[in-house]
Image (spheres, helix red, strand yellow):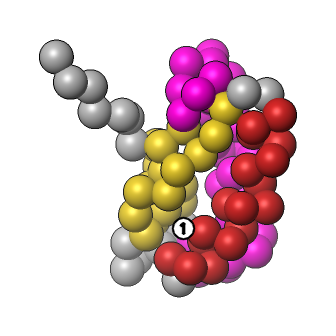
Amino acid sequence: MKEKVQEVLEKIRPSLQFDGGDVELVDVTEDGIVKVRLTGACGSCPFATMTLKAGIERILKQEIPEIKEVQEVSASRSI
């Protein structure tokens, strides 16, 4: 299923990149949870949650019915 998710994200990616952002697939769990990291402009955008839920999650669920939810994983920061 991870490969299918990656294929769908590749279709979404140009729209995000147009606005200076991107999405990175972190993991797909066996119970249908997709974990992604929003990067670039999307990482700090106040509308990131809307992009994640109304955009990325909606499209992934449409294309892959087994997907239950998309969750954002925050970037790890080094000190």
Q: Is residue 54 above or below residue 69?
A: above
Q: Quadrant of residue 74?
A: top left
Q: What x and y, as percent, mark residue 69?
A: 53, 59
Q: Is residue 4 above or below residue 33?
A: below
The quadrant of the rendering that contains the C terminus is top left
Q: What x and y, as percent, mark residue 25?
A: 50, 57
Position of 31 compared to 76: left or right? right
Taking the spot 60% from the left edge, 71% from the top edge, the residue there is: 5
- Taking the view exactly as shown, the residue that stands out farthest to the left is 79
Q: Is residue 53 above or below residue 18?
A: below
Q: Is residue 2 visible?
A: yes
What is the secondary structure assignment of the residue under circle 1? loop
Q: Quadrant of residue 67?
A: bottom right
Q: Is residue 61 visible?
A: no
Taking the spot 20% from the left edge, 24% from the top edge, the residue there is: 78
Count of residue discs: 1
Main SS, magenta region, reads: helix
- The residue at which mark 1 appears reads as 68
Residue range highlighted in magenta: 39-67
Q: Is residue 48 magenta?
A: yes
Taking the spot 81% from the left edge, 47% from the top edge, the residue there is: 14
Q: What x and y, as percent, mark residue 18?
A: 83, 34
Q: What x and y, as percent, mark residue 10?
A: 71, 61
Camera-side residue of 47 and 75: 75
Camera-side residue of 50 and 22: 22
Position of 58 compared to 68: left or right? right
Mark 1 Cα within 10 Å, few/some/many (few <14, many 20+)?
A: few
> Which residue type does callout 1 highlight?
Lys
Position of 78 compared to 29: left or right? left
